[in-house]
Image (tube, helix red, strand yellow):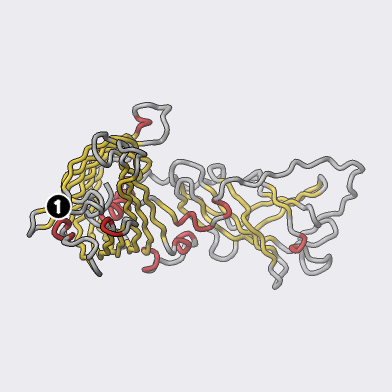
Amino acid sequence: MGPDIGQAGAAGGRGIAAGLVLLLSAPVVAAAQQAPAPFEAVISGMEYDSADGAVRVDLRFLNPGEQAAMLDLPARIEGRLEQDGQGRAVMLEAEPGQAGSRNIPPGGFARARYRLPPLTGSGVRTGTLLSLPRWSSMQVALDPALIKPAGEGSAVQMAAAEPPASPPAKEAVPLPVDPAPGNDFLGNLSAYQPIYAVYAPGTNSDGRLQLSFKYQLFGSRRRDNLPYNWRHGLYFGYTQRMFWDLGAYSMPFRNIDFQPELFYLTPSHTTENGITFGAQIGIRHESNGRDDEASRSVNSLYVAPMAAVALDNGYSLSLAPTLSFLVGSTSDNPGIERYRGKLGLFAELGSDEGWRFTANGRFNVSSGKGAIGLDASYPLPRLWRSSPDFYLFAQSFHGYGENLLDYNRAVTRLRFGIALVR
């Protein structure tokens, strides 16, 4: 379950729990590799520097593995220039502050800029290829605009060669189809609330689906290893819950809840006894995009302190009480605070490789109303080795406001399905 029960639960609990649980239960980071074999370098751009005639080469070092790993970026990287069957080695030197150790998440990348000495000589012309043999089989053709006329300053020289009578055809280097290399800020995206699809027949919302992500607004500062400041903790989050009436004619969606938010995630702090503390503070908008009597819209401010501790056998326990306040008009939802309340509690017990159990509750002490939701999940590949990377997922709910449309209606639900993120 996410930070809310239905649409009105413990605001922010799942988000901060995710950050600190990962801190406690993440795989051990691999030691720095002397050889670059676990990583792959991609030449993502080149720029001519008119000040000294050098070429600035932008590199991305990809981690294709399933675990985070440390990459020790060298001060110098050997490259190769090749043309008409002739080639020679060149050395690319790291720009100031670019070399050093980087912790790269699984499937992620680190960016670095290196300097290639000025290119001159009649043999360096259109069609010259640059590659990094120890890091990648990729070859990139140099732009003629990057090549200075012969005789201008120090240079990487290559002897001119007479083209053969019948030059061998060179196999074209295919362009990458993965959109990541051309989109610098995909590294800012990460999981937020669980992503799942669950089902149980016999209600007006047999199916429930949820999509969610968060975006680190200043993530490039982290990737560039800039000193930490408050901007590192700013995120945009988005969660969408869909309640599907599969038993009705034409199978309409009974309700869709949209939940954008802006929040700040504090740096985590671990005490000597192994307890990790943190907090999430944010402002959230919730609406269902309907009109007239079915319209629902509400805004809230929330703060959620959190504590997590590592247990035996790879398990960890996280707790996050939540205090939230409605702001602005609640005319679309008369008396919603009576059913939602200001207090919430998130609790999670589990491991990355096994079971995970999540409880999420909200309470109004004066009215005695509220709700509680329970999730249980288990990695499907642990049961069936050739299965896709899904989790078996069970979800229950009891109380008021499973979705924003039904904020004042009590229901009990038990659904089963799969999850991509738990």
Percent of width and height locating residue 279: 26, 60
Looking at the rendered structure, the number of numbered marks drawn on it comes to 1
Residue pictured at 26% horizontal, 40% vertical: 356
Under mark 1, the amino acid is Gly
Q: Identify the image quadrant of residue 300.
A: bottom left
Query: Looking at the image, which is closer to me, 17 or 410?
Result: 410
Residue identifier under label 1? 370
Judge left or right: residue 369 versus residue 319: left
Q: Residue 269, relative to residue 382: is it above or below?
A: below
Q: Residue furthest right?
A: 165
Which image quarter is the C terminus in? top left
- Judged from the image, the secondary structure of the residue bearing numbered disc 1 is strand
Is residue 92 toward the left or the right of residue 245 in the image?
right
Q: Is residue 313 above or below residue 68?
A: above
Q: Nearer the viewer, residue 397 or 128?
A: 397
Is residue 23 at all visible to an observer of this figure? Answer: no
Q: Quadrant of residue 407?
A: bottom left
x 38%, y 44%: residue: 28
Task: Residue 236 in the image: state x and y as whole percent.
Answer: 38, 61
Label 1 Cα crowd, 10 Å radius (few <14 / some 14-19 / many 20+) = many
* Residue 222 location, quadrant: bottom left
Q: Can you see residue 54?
A: yes
